[in-house]
Amino acid sequence: METATRRMRAAVAQRVEARRARRRLAGEIAAYRTPAERLELDLILGRHTEEEIAEIDAILRAQPHARALELT
């Protein structure tokens, strides 16, 4: 029988792992720095639906250099 404590620990562990995964993904996306690399990333993402790339799109919009590129 699963206790409330075990469920709570499992939920916390899942959130921690989700944050780690998001940080890793953000780091990988940040490696695309030049306009040519960003174009390559855009072409890759263009092959997928908005739902499939929603998390990546949110990360891109949060990156300062991504916003700077959008303004140019």
Image (spheres, rainbow, N blue to C red):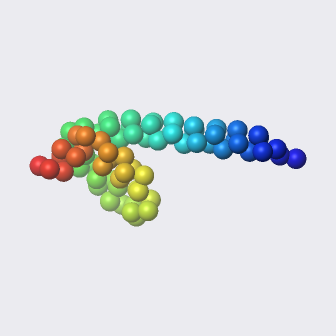
Nearest the eye: 48 or 25: 25
In the picture, measured across the screen, residue 3 lies left or right of residue 27, that is right
Task: Give the residue displayed 40% in from the left and 56% down from the top.
Answer: 53
Direction front: furthest residue: 4
Circle count: 0
Residue at the spot x=45%, y=36% of the render?
24
Looking at the image, residue 23 sits to the left or right of residue 42; the answer is right
- Residue 31 against residue 43 in the figure, above or below: above
Q: Quadrant of residue 27?
A: top left
Question: Percent position (x, y) of residue 19?
Answer: 51, 39
Q: Is residue 14 left or right of residue 34?
A: right
Residue 7 point in image, percent of width and height = 74, 45
Relative to the observer, which residue lies in front, 39 or 57? 57
Residue farthest along the right direction in this orientation: 1
Image quarter of residue 50: bottom left
Of the pair 4 and 17, the residue shown nearer to us = 4
Q: Which percent across, then down, holds residue 23?
A: 44, 37
Residue 33 falls in which quadrant of the image? top left
> Which residue appears at 23% of the width and 40% of the height?
65
Residue 11 at what x, y percent from top left?
Answer: 66, 44
